[in-house]
Amino acid sequence: MNLHQTGIMDPIPAVGRHLLFNLGPETQKASLASALTRLADRVDGQGVILGLGLGVTSTLGVRLPGLHAFPTHASEAASIPATDHALWCWLRGDDRGTLLHQARHLSRLLAPDFVLAQDLEVFRYENSLDLTGYEDGTENPQGEEALAVAFTTDAGPGLDGSSIAALQQWVHDLDRFEAMPGPEQDAVFGRRHADNEEIDDAPESAHVKRTAQESFDPEAFVLRRSMPWSDCGQSGLAFLAFGRDAQAFEAQLHRMTGQEDGIVDALFSITRPVTGDYFWCPPMVHGRPDLRALGL
């Protein structure tokens, strides 16, 4: 029996929406618990993925393994913000209109205890490409390895099958990127655009060298489910990664921002994150989220 939200393991959908909520100004423990119980009836773990932030757990007076504040970093070359939303729903499907109505209904269901702070529409670009044209998530773990990377095990009922999600909205400067010569573009990623093969002599700032998951000690593998977004003249990538905890993601972020060796990931020359959130994704039981770890 699958304990995890199965949509996390599924390939990315044609379209999606990331709904990010803050707590309402008068939300109390009792009303918050009631809102989560209502929401649980709408979350199937496949078309609707649920994640809970620190705002929820602190209001309920519980602590969940692996869930903590999103790490921040500020430098001239690489800045990482934290937005720490209280609740996240990832809607997945193949029809924009259907997801639009789902988003409306969920927002109404959760009010006034949760207030919608952001509704980010995402989409699949060709065969899971970033808008730069480079493949995203090339070295994603597969099968049993992906399960081991993404989900908690041997922690007991209410925790087994849970996951920590890291979500960031990155804004690309596509005009600047497209103005680069092809070899310079390849050097940013450390892969050739033509065949997606790694470049042996890529600079140390190349993204593949900054984030080579097997090069960390311990290895820093995550399960990526990122998708592009575009809105109001801006566009970029909604970076999404799942892990049994946040350690692997934070190790990669630490190196990307130059905190490990002073070398900043070349990605920061063409894109920047504007949000940063961690969410605890509960396991499933009998077709609905298992909220026992929250005392519900």
Image (cartoon, rainbow, N blue to C red):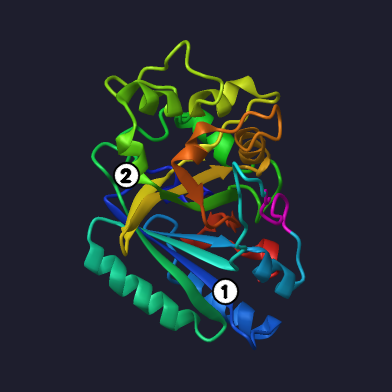
Q: Position of residue 273 (x, y in %)?
A: 52, 51
Using the image, determine if residue 289 lies above or below residue 106: above
Using the image, determine if residue 206 lies above or below residue 58: above
* Closest to the observer, 22 or 172: 172
Few, some or many residues within 10 Å of mark 1 (<14, 14–19, 20+): many
Residue 129 visible in the picture: no
* Closest to the observer, 253 or 108: 253
Q: Quadrant of residue 199?
A: top left
Image quarter in which the C terminus is found:
bottom right
Secondary structure found at label 2: helix
Residue 223 in the figure: left or right of residue 154: left
Per the image, the residue denoted by label 1 is 22
What is the span of residues highlighted in magenta in the rendered image? 64-73
Q: Position of residue 290 (x, y in %)?
A: 58, 61
Few, some or many residues within 10 Å of mark 2 (<14, 14–19, 20+): few
Residue 175's disc is 2
